[in-house]
Amino acid sequence: MKTVTLIPGDGIGTEIVEAVQEVFKAANAPIEWEVQIAGKTAYEKYGELMPNSLLESIERNKVALKGPVETPVGGGFKSINVSLRQKYDLYQNVRPCKNTVGINTRFTDVDLVLFRENTEGLYSGLILYDERLQIVDSISRISMKGCLRIVKAAFEYAKKYKRKKVTVVHKANILKKSGGMMLEAAQIVSKDYPDVEWNDKIIDNMCMQLVTKPEQFDVIVTSNLFGDILSDLCAGLVGGLGVVPGANIGDEIAIFEAVHGTAPDIAGKGIANPTAILRSAIMMLEYLGESEVAKRIDTALDKTLAIKELCTGDLGGKANTKTFTQNVIANLA
Ligand SMILES: NC(=O)c1ccc[n+]([C@@H]2O[C@H](COP(=O)([O-])OP(=O)(O)OC[C@H]3O[C@@H](n4cnc5c(N)ncnc54)[C@H](O)[C@@H]3O)[C@@H](O)[C@H]2O)c1
């Protein structure tokens, strides 16, 4: 039995996290949950977005599953997601995007995994503001160490899961130094992976290629800002943010999360789709070495998604969160 920190979060967070707990229980997944609050819920209770008890729990368990959280607008609050990534050096943001039978999209053969560098670039928080001239310099800090470790993570993944190719995305033609570093890192790292094919693409061309011929891509690795944009673009290719999982992984700690928000417009109505958080929880099981039960839940989820009536309203179905969860559990058999 492994103990995992469970952060329901705000809005629909509690509803979708409950779905995970029920499915895991039905599948006998060897996970014990340690529930911790964060975001608006924690702020209302403790006056803090990330209470100490939450941080201690993550540090103790090393693995967390997180629902969406609300960072209050204004008041100088720093995003909880960005704070956790930086605090625990969760440098890999991993987003698998694969077509699902039953979810209608423009393409049918997308199956890619995006590795986004999660701690550097324009998100480093290095800002110079000249109030008199009203000019902001937002510094994009890129290090060779940062590029090498994210590229290595992508190649390692390709090798482990026998993926065909790694595509390195950059802007080295114009941003010679900052953009070129990711490409340079790939030239170094690829030497250790002679069996993994790789190529590189400039970000603007990459966007065009992804929306016209996405099936040519397999594992993609890129910097923080490009990855932020590409990961939502790729989610759009396979059904949107409501169905894709996400993971933030460091050398010590990993936080798995649904990438959609708190959906305030439907919170409390019991109609939220728990697919994204369930898929993030499946990724978490694989990370913990529980591949057999991960596969079983994944198959049950795919079987459910294949039949429209069994799905939630956002996917054109008739189920609510509870009945969808029961449909997944029935398919575990
Ligand atoms: N990872 C996170 O914690 C995270 C990510 C994005 C936004 N947020 C926060 O969430 C709040 C709302 O943001 P937003 O409205 O821009 O985006 P959102 O993702 O919450 O909602 C966008 C639309 O998608 C729908 N939707 C989202 N998830 C769904 C689900 N699981 N099932 C069915 N429908 C779903 C919503 O009903 C809404 O119509 C903000 O406070 C924002 O800061 C948090």
Image (spheres, helix red, strand yellow):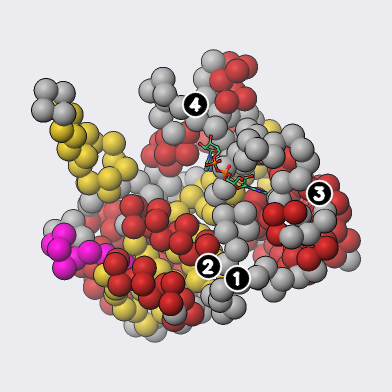
Quarter holding ligand 1: top right
Q: What's the residue type where badge 2 is placed? A: Leu
Q: What's the residue type where badge 1 is placed? A: Thr
- Marks 1 and 3 sit apart, C-alpha to C-alpha, by 22 Å
Q: What's the residue type where badge 4 is placed? A: Pro
Vertical placement of 267 versus 318: above or below?
Answer: above
- Identify the mark nearer the N-term, 1 or 4: 4
Q: Main secondary structure of the magenta part?
A: loop
- Marks 2 and 1 sit apart, C-alpha to C-alpha, by 7 Å
Residue 91: x and y, percent?
Answer: 39, 50
Residue ID for mark 1: 105
- Marks 1 and 4 sit apart, C-alpha to C-alpha, by 34 Å
Residue closer to the observer: 213 or 27: 213
**What is the crowding at mark 3: few (fewer than 14 residues within 10 Å), some, or many (at least 20)?**
many
Where residue 237 is drawn, which disc sits there? Answer: 2
Q: Disc 4 vs disc 2: Cβ atoms closer than 8 Å?
A: no
SS at mark 2?
A: helix
- Marks 3 and 2 sit apart, C-alpha to C-alpha, by 24 Å
Residue 138: x and y, percent?
Answer: 21, 39
Residue ID for mark 4: 72
Tell me which corner region of the image, top left, top right, bottom left or bottom right, holds residue 11. Answer: top right
- Identify the mark nearer the N-term, 2 or 1: 1
Q: Disc 2 vs disc 1: Cβ atoms closer than 8 Å?
A: yes
Residue range in magenta is 168-176
Q: Look at the image and say whether residue 73 sits in the magenta stretch.
A: no
Residue ID for mark 3: 320
